[in-house]
Image (cartoon, coloured by chain):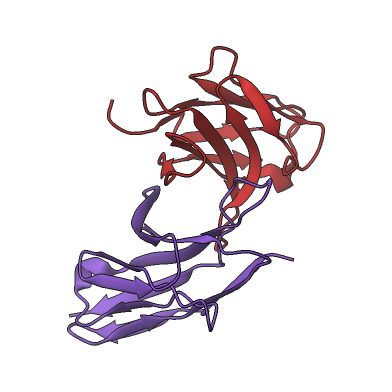
Chain colours: A purple, B red
Amino acid sequence: GNSVTQMEGPVTLSEEAFLTINCTYTATGYPSLFWYVQYPGEGLQLLLKATKADDKGSNKGFEATYRKETTSFHLEKGSVQVSDSAVYFCAPLFRGSARQLTFGSGTQLTVLP
Amino acid sequence: GAGVSQSPRYKVAKRGQDVALRCDPISGHVSLFWYQQALGQGPEFLTYFQNEAQLDKSGLPSDRFFAERPEGSVSTLKIQRTQQEDSAVYLCASSLDDNQPQHFGDGTRLSIL
């Protein structure tokens, strides 16, 4: 069946550190892939997306590449800021009759000054 | 407004009461989704509308949950005879169509006493 596995948190980094949050999926087809971010007290915001293999989504210094071979969509940022502190969700949109996003469990990121 | 609007932001109810949560999607968005997010977890799908048609309600946890979108715009999620386990954040999302990214509201935090 279809599923998503996301690196568990919490993750605590110092400002300007490198960030990687792992996300892998299991699917019968090729899903579209999304990362959403949830800042404290706010709703989910789309961070970036990729719809086919080898696509790279990028936004606000964050990047993720759709890797069909490893069924992964890891989120990376070269230099995190305090303002990046939030919860990050990997969310595939699996093909077929289902149209809803399937969310990972979320990774809490705290960036210290 | 420009984004998805949900009301109320917070709702406290006593066990056994009925509640109604409102979602005002982005104008022109055909698809509308409801998700439930428990504390510390990723959102989980409840139901999906395409215009006024409810095409998928497989995620509704019980027959106490009911959703409607009578004119293909505003949607209401109703929970009858609330239970403590219904306490969660209820998120609404809309998209132009099934293949476009979903845009989320800030959610309604429901607390059942």
Does B80 sit above or below residue A23? above
**In-image side of B66 versus A74 (left or right):** right
Does A97 sit above or below residue A52? above
Residue B101 pos. (x, y %):
42, 47
Residue A112 pos. (x, y %):
24, 80
Q: Nearer the viewer, residue A73 or A43?
A: A73
* Residue A40 shows in the view: no
Residue A14 placement: quadrant:
bottom left
Residue B16 pos. (x, y %):
76, 30
**In-image side of A87 versus B56 (left or right):** left
Locate the N terminus of chain B by quadrant.
Answer: top left
Residue A108 placement: quadrant:
bottom left
Does A69 sit above or below residue B95? below
**In-image side of A32 versus A12 (left or right):** right
Task: Identify the residue at the far right of this view.
Answer: B63
Residue A81 placement: quadrant:
bottom left
